Image (tube, helix red, strand yellow):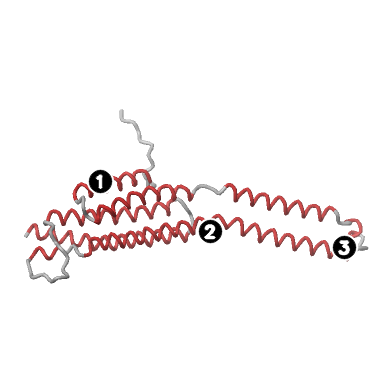
Amino acid sequence: MARKSHRDYRTLNADEIVRTVAKLADRIAERFPDSGLTGAAQQLRDTATDTARRAQGLSRPYLGLRALVLVVAVGGLTVLWRILKDVDWSGIALRSNDLALAETLESSVNLVVLMAAGLWFLLTLEERWKRARTQTALNELRAFAHVIDMHQLTKDPTVLLSDGPKTPSSPERRMTRFELTRYLEYCAEMMALTGKLAALYAGETHDHVVIAAASDIETLCTDLGRKIWQKITILGELAEG
């Protein structure tokens, strides 16, 4: 009887993505050892490792900051209790000390407002710190997607149709149809994996700002990847022709 797998297929597995990126980097290095794409793939492998670590850190609480919030809350309540403890409640009840009542209410209200403002600042500080760090990392992934796109920009499959005259500024095109196809497929895989790395951040947080930014990068990678697959389709049609 086959054993049931306990793996959760409803969420992205960061370790599997890192292994896939590493395997892709090895494949590219073996096929195009001296190309710029090999260097980009190796950097993507390092980025994948960093992304997996950073994404996991999004779900971890900042214990020091939360302890500070607790200390501030307890300290504020303690001060408020002492103020209320020293009030002449019997005089206030007999309406013989209206000045004490006014001073007590004013001090209490001011303290509560300051406590609420301080606690709100500290409670949202963790989210804002995580958001800032994550957006910086997502911007790196966005830039990486454009770098991948630059590597395939001059890989034009239509030049295989004819050997027209070249200009001094024409890029070198020494790849065979097979090599060009593999090169473009590697670019498409790198683009797709970049989008999946962005999705790792979205899967570890409920911050709508981070989720929206990660979604934008996935959309960017999909759009850029679609252009690459159009070139691959053209190469396929050339092969059939």
Q: Secondary structure at mark 3?
A: helix
Residue 128 point in image, percent of width and height: 53, 59
Q: CA distance from mark 2 to mark 3?
A: 41 Å
The label number, if any, that marks residue 26 in the structure image:
1
Location of mark 2 (residue): 128
| Residue ID for mark 3 | 100
Q: Nearer the viewer, mark 2 or mark 3?
A: 2
Nearest to the observer: residue 25 or residue 235: 25
Q: Are marks 2 and 1 in contact (CB under 8 Å)?
A: no
Q: Amino acid at mark 2?
A: Arg
Disc number placed over residue 167 in the picture, else none: none
Disc 1 to disc 3, how far (Cα)? 78 Å
Q: Is residue 66 above or below residue 173?
A: above
Q: Secondary structure at mark 1?
A: helix
What quarter of the picture does the C terminus occupy? Answer: bottom left
Q: Which amino acid, mark 3?
A: Ala
Amino acid type of the residue that numbered disc 1 sits on in the rendered structure: Asp
Q: Position of residue 87 (x, y in %)?
A: 86, 56
Does residue 190 appear to the left or right of 31 in the view shown? right
Q: Mark 1 or 3 closer to N-term?
A: 1
Is 11 left, or right, of 130 in this rendering?
A: left
